[in-house]
Amino acid sequence: MTIDYLTFSNFIIDDIIFPDGQTSMNTMGGSGLHALVGIRLWSDKVGYAAAVGEDLSSQHQQALERFGLDLTGLIVRPGFKTPRSWLVMEWNGRRTEVSRTELADFRRMRVMPQDLPPSYRQARGFHLNWGTLPEARDLCIELRRTNPNITIVYELATSNMGEPVEEIQRLLPYLTLFSPNIDEALTLTGLPANTKPETICDILLEWGAPQVALRMGAEGSLVKAQNGEGYRLPAVPTEIIDETGAGNSYCGGILTGLGDGLSLPEAALRGAVSASFALEQHGLPNWTEMPKKEANQRLIWAKERLEKI
């Protein structure tokens, strides 16, 4: 199968506790899976590169297949269990993640570049949320060596936040687009909390990012490119069931737009729409058919509110 877009990231089973005491146990998650929700909305040729344990249930595997994902990049690691986390949600939007997998095991079993099927390496676009910053840079260089036109959208992992800022500066030029959330961006740049989003984007562009998509939750997003072109997008309204993974889905949507040759604002509109669909359920959507009509309606709504800056 030809793969157009994929995530190179992780697969985690989440046990979620909500502020009202309700729970959603044994829910498929991880940044990679949520990014795939955003990708799948716009593409039928989608791959998943991640590592799982021998205990991955047939129920979960079948759900991934029903969702239309190619799983030749989903690697089973003998002797390991699939990573698992507690997610505790609070009324103010704060989310606490407690890994139930030892960090050493998580690192030992993670997907590696040598695990990539050849067809994945020739994909139009990669969502990348993996490794240390130097490892991510090396992977980007390797991918571009054999696939020069590849689109790479990168988002940080929590573990990256303690790495030297010089390492993110070395990585940024090899990306197509860098998409941190606003808290990550403020931490990276050392800027005060009241800094204007436009200023944050300008710093990241000065550091070498070709394009930046700054995710701001309910405040929407701001995208800006090296040529000075910038736009503010609203968050697309929807019924919120679970906020987990909306930012990842945004990255998946914007990836397909850039990979399909759309302009930065047009691609970002896809990201905003993808994020709205991710909010409507726990884990994977249970779509009996792709919601193309609803996606296009939301796209029109967001485009009418697109603001050039």
Image: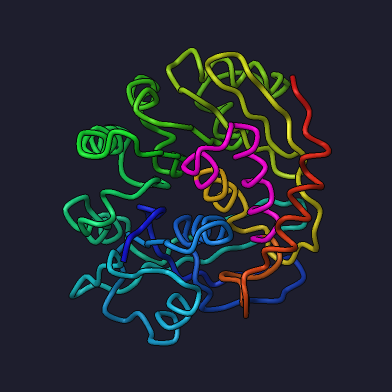
Give the main secondary structure, helix, strand or loop, of the magenta stretch. Answer: helix
- Left or right of 39: which side holds 19? right
Name the spot of residue 190 as percent of width and height, x first. 55, 19
Q: Nearer the viewer, residue 71 or 304?
A: 304
Q: In the figure, 95 relative to 60: above or below?
A: above
Position of 173 with respect to 215 (left or right) is left
Q: Quadrant of the C terminus?
A: top right
- Image x and y of residue 89, in percent: 66, 60
Say which residue appears at 43% left-offset and 31% top-offset.
Answer: 176
Q: In the figure, 31 relative to 152: above or below?
A: below
Is 276 magenta? The answer is yes
Measuring from the top left, give residue 214's x and y in whole percent.
61, 32
Rendering quarter of residue 209: top left
Residue at image location 74% in from the left, 36% down from the top: 233
Q: In the image shown, does 81 or 21 lie closer to the viewer?
A: 81
Q: Residue at x 45, y 39 (%)?
A: 153
In this view, the residue in front, 264 or 86, is 264
Residue 26 on the magenta span: no
Q: Which residues are magenta?
A: 256-278
Q: Is residue 178 left or right of residue 277?
A: left
Colouring style? rainbow
Quadrant in the rendering for residue 185? top right
Q: Is residue 32 left or right of residue 79?
A: right
